[in-house]
Image (cartoon, rainbow, N blue to C red):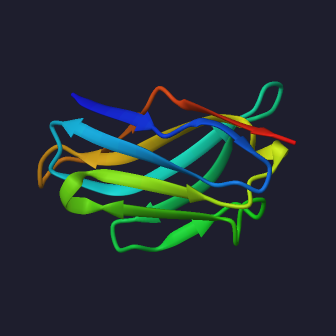
Amino acid sequence: QVQLVESGGGLVQAGGSLTLSCAASGSIFSINAWYWYRQAPGKQRELVASISVGGVTVYADTVKGRFTISRINAKKTEFLQMSNLKPEDTAVYCCAADVQHSPSSAAYNYWGQGTQVTVSS
């Protein structure tokens, strides 16, 4: 019912920047919260950042001051601006969203497929 598609991943040198995008489509009344997660090989999945419908943002300590999450509600799109990237930021980055299908429905969590970010030293 809802599809999330990420874009913007790739290979970048340490100290560089990338911006990830995540576009939502389908049966959407509202998106109550957006998330970015990442998972590196052999490591647990980590919540990188989130943004609420009111614009409140939360960041993992590992990315504070370097990553910025934002969204354009009208376009049902969120972004993750990443700067001063480090090799330890290498991971598959997935977006997720809490979506309401109607004014009276509960919010359901949906995930994208993920996009690879590789930071070379």
Which residue is most to the left? 103
- How many dots with numbers? 0
Compared with residue 32, is residue 88 higher up or lower down, i.e. above or below? above
Which residue is most to the right? 121
Determine which quarter of the picture holds residue 112. top left
Find residue 103 and report its horizontal and vertical position in percent.
12, 55
Find residue 65 and report its horizontal and vertical position in percent.
70, 72
**Residue drawn at point x = 36 percent, y = 61 percent:** 71
Quadrant for the C terminus in the image: top right
Compared with residue 90, is residue 82 higher up or lower down, i.e. above or below? below
Compared with residue 100, is residue 61 higher up or lower down, i.e. above or below? below
Q: Is residue 29 left or right of residue 35?
A: left
Q: Is residue 7 left or right of residue 53?
A: right
Q: Is residue 9 left or right of residue 26?
A: right
For the residue pair 116 and 113, the one nearer the viewer reads as 116
Determine which quarter of the picture holds residue 11. top right
**Residue drawn at point x = 70 percent, y = 60 percent:** 60
Compared with residue 93, is residue 55 higher up or lower down, i.e. above or below? below
**Residue drawn at point x = 59 percent, y = 43 percent:** 37
Quadrant for the N terminus in the image: top left
For the residue pair 114 and 57, the one nearer the viewer reads as 114
**Residue drawn at point x = 32 percent, y = 51 percent:** 77
For the residue pair 121 and 23, the one nearer the viewer reads as 121
Find residue 14 and report its horizontal and vertical position in percent.
80, 49
Find residue 64 and report its horizontal and vertical position in percent.
70, 68
